[in-house]
Image: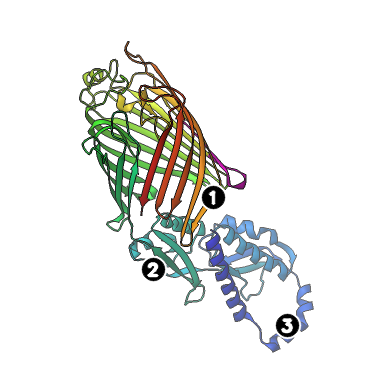
Amino acid sequence: MRLLSGLLGGLMMLALTSACAENMPNEAESAAAGKTDAVQKEETFDIMEIQVEGNSVLTQIAIEEAVYPFLGEKKSIKEVENARQALEKAYHDAGYLTVFVDIPEQQVNEGTVRLKATEGKVERLKVSGSRYFSLGRIKSRTPELAEGSVPYFPEVEKQVSELARNPDRKVTPILRPGRSPGKVEVELKVADEFPLHGNLELNNRYSAGTTHTRLSGSLRYDNLWQREHSVSLQFQAAPENPGESKVFSANYVWPLAGGDVLALYGVRSNSDTVAVGDVGVIGNGRILGARFIHPLRGMPGFYHSATAGWDYKAFKETVNLLGSDSLNTPITYQPFTLAYDATWQNEQRMFQLSTAFNFSVRGLGNQEKEFSDKRYNANPNYSYLRLDLKHTEKMASGWSLFGRLLTQLTSAPLISNEQFGAGGADSVRGYLETEVLGDRGALGSLELRTPSFWQGESGMPGQAYMVGFIEGAHLEVLEPLASQQARFTLSSSGLGMRWKAKGYTLNLDLAKPFKDTNNTKAEDVRVHARMLYEF
């Protein structure tokens, strides 16, 4: 709004200057006016009604509230000017910053005074500088600036901000007086980039009994059909042994009216354990899914949305991690998801909340025998609630503190694909990826971040800082078999480094685990490394 207000400030000055020039008396008139000033100041008249000409945007109630204090007997021209200023302020406060009010030449008869509102309508809307995005679509997404309209600037700011949300496009509105008196011209100046993005990542996020390196990459185009639809392809593989882990996925994001989004995706996996976005995959199988995301009305610094989703999951087999499943058998089922996400943010802190209710219903392709074969007492009518809380607090001298709490709640045994996993670079560092599984559990992390000690080089801005962390998790397996472990506890602490500059990212963590597992011994330091290039 600061940018728009600044532009409009210049526009108002131009309008006022023009108005003053048109009404400036010549020298003779000025001399005559000077002789009668004293008489005019003493003249009074009754103002019983103020009529406003040219209004089409303010309600009658808003007009009456603005001018009512200036009605009455024995008023002077000063009260008329004050009424004009109050009415003009009412227009501007209501968001109509291109409206100006003047006092037409008149004689006050029977207590009636006329004010004239000049509504600065858009005479011409121009889009310039756009190379990769449709000019017509940019115009269509700013209906408040359509030719012939009186701009309502809170809505203008919202529409321009929506255009600028695309990271490949910056939009700057420029307003200037139109060719016709009382009109304005609007130019939307666009600076855009080719909307193709990709990344390539090498890390050591491996699970027990597999090679240590993982290579992943993605390619995404964000302006399909010139309607800003997005399509992307991703892969993940084990370069040391390609047959050990292969995952391919595709996503299609379809922006809908009103800011809603429909996302469609598919995953094909041949892997012991892998995470593709927010989808956890264990074993050989495939996933098809859809998500409908509806942004809710927020306020400055507060953004939230609701999501409804459906998945089709078919797995040929699942690795038996710590006896979570009794048999490695095929299973096909269709779960649903209802989620709510919110972010509160200001200059000092950011708080994020993500909660999801996941459930499945018997009869929708879910076979009870498949579930019971998969795990003793598992049921196709399962449900669980997952809650993820994150908080970042900025402190003095550039230090910051990050905390996270992630938990899953359920009352019945789950198959391993829906269980809560812990261990790994994004969970409890010092352990292998998804080293333990449980039906319910909680994970906590606390991380202290130093000020950046490197700000990049000339032409290559960046940052580098150190982190210290402590984290842990506790998981429970419901109704375990006699051979199964019912509870798991993981905990660790360590130090790390983050470096980022112009598309390059390097993360390095050294973590010491405090609890033994089947694959990790306490006190054995583990290194988590991640190298990423993105464009």
Which circle's residue, 2 or 1, is located before the other in the chain? 2
Mark 1 or 3, nearer chain start: 3
Q: Is 363 on the left-hand or right-hand side of 396?
A: left
Q: Which residue is mark 3?
A: 33
Looking at numbered disc 2 in the image, what kind of residue is underneath it?
Gly
Residue that numbered label 1 is attached to:
453
In the rendered view of the protein, which quadrant contains the C terminus?
bottom left
Query: How far apart, in angstroms, are the residues tagged by discs 1 and 3?
Result: 69 Å
Viewer-side label of 1, 3: 1
Element marked by disc 3: helix
Position of residue 85 measured from the top left corner of the image (x, y, whole percent): 65, 65
Separation (CA) of disc 2 from disc 1: 38 Å
**Which of the labelled discs sits on residue 129, or is there none?**
2
Marks 3/2: CA–CA distance: 51 Å
Question: Is 384 in front, or is 77?
Answer: 384
- Label 1: few (<14), some or many (≥20) within 10 Å? few
Q: Is label 2 in a helix, a strand or a loop?
A: loop
Q: Earlier in the sequence, mark 3 or mark 2?
A: 3
Q: Nearer the viewer, mark 2 or mark 1?
A: 1
Instruction: Give the residue type that dot 3 points to.
Output: Ala
Q: Residue at x 26, y 41 (%)?
A: 239
Image coordinates for residue 384, horizontal then vertical, percent: 38, 25
Extent of the magenta region: 392-405
Element on which disc 1 rests: loop
Q: Position of residue 376 (x, y in %)?
A: 28, 15
Q: Is residue 48 visible?
A: yes
When the figure is inspected, residue 55 is found, relative to residue 413, above or below; the finding is below
Q: Nearer the viewer, mark 3 or mark 2?
A: 2
Using residue 22 as the reference point, say whether residue 275 is left or right of it: left
Residue 12 falls within the magenta-colored stretch: no
| View extreme (bottom): residue | 28
